[in-house]
Image (cartoon, helix red, strand yellow):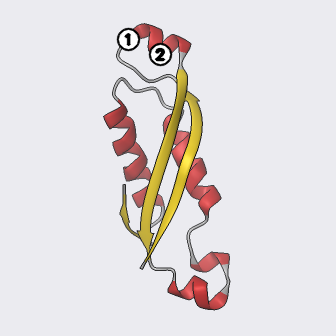
Amino acid sequence: MAQIALEGMEFFAYHGCFSEEQIIGTRFVVDLFIETDTKEAEETDKLSKTLNYQDIYLTVKDQMGMKSKLLEHVGRRILNAVLEKFPGIDYAE
């Protein structure tokens, strides 16, 4: 089991409860920690045997692009999307 960390992903997005926040927007930083089995990737050196970090980043970016009032909701959407799209993930936070 290995941990993959995608830290410091920066997005400009329009989240917040106040209408101004959803109009003006702000910069957000997302850290995502994933646990997965990387044994095959370690042994074969094949991208197809592990998680593609770019695909994960693009999944997070898609979720950040959808307006939400609560950051808790954005976080849950990100986790749900990542876990659904990448079944090899055992745990994510």
Please give the label number shown on residue 78.
none
Task: Tell me the quadrant of the picture where the N terminus can be found.
Answer: bottom left
Residue on which the image places disc 2: 22
Image coordinates of residue 6 in percent, x first then y, are: 54, 55
Q: Nearer the viewer, residue 23 or 26?
A: 26
Image coordinates of residue 35 in percent, x first then y, are: 41, 69
Looking at the rendered structure, the kind of residue marked 1 is: Phe
Label 1 secondary element: loop
Label 2 secondary element: helix
Please give the label number shown on residue 18.
1
The reply to whether dot 1 and dot 2 touch (C-beta < 8 Å) is: yes
Residue 88 to residue 44: above or below = above
Residue 47 figure quarter: bottom right
Image coordinates of residue 38 in percent, x first then y, are: 51, 80
Residue 64 to residue 8: above or below = above
Residue 10 figure quarter: top right
Residue at image position (44%, 24%) is 15
Residue 67 to residue 36: above or below = above
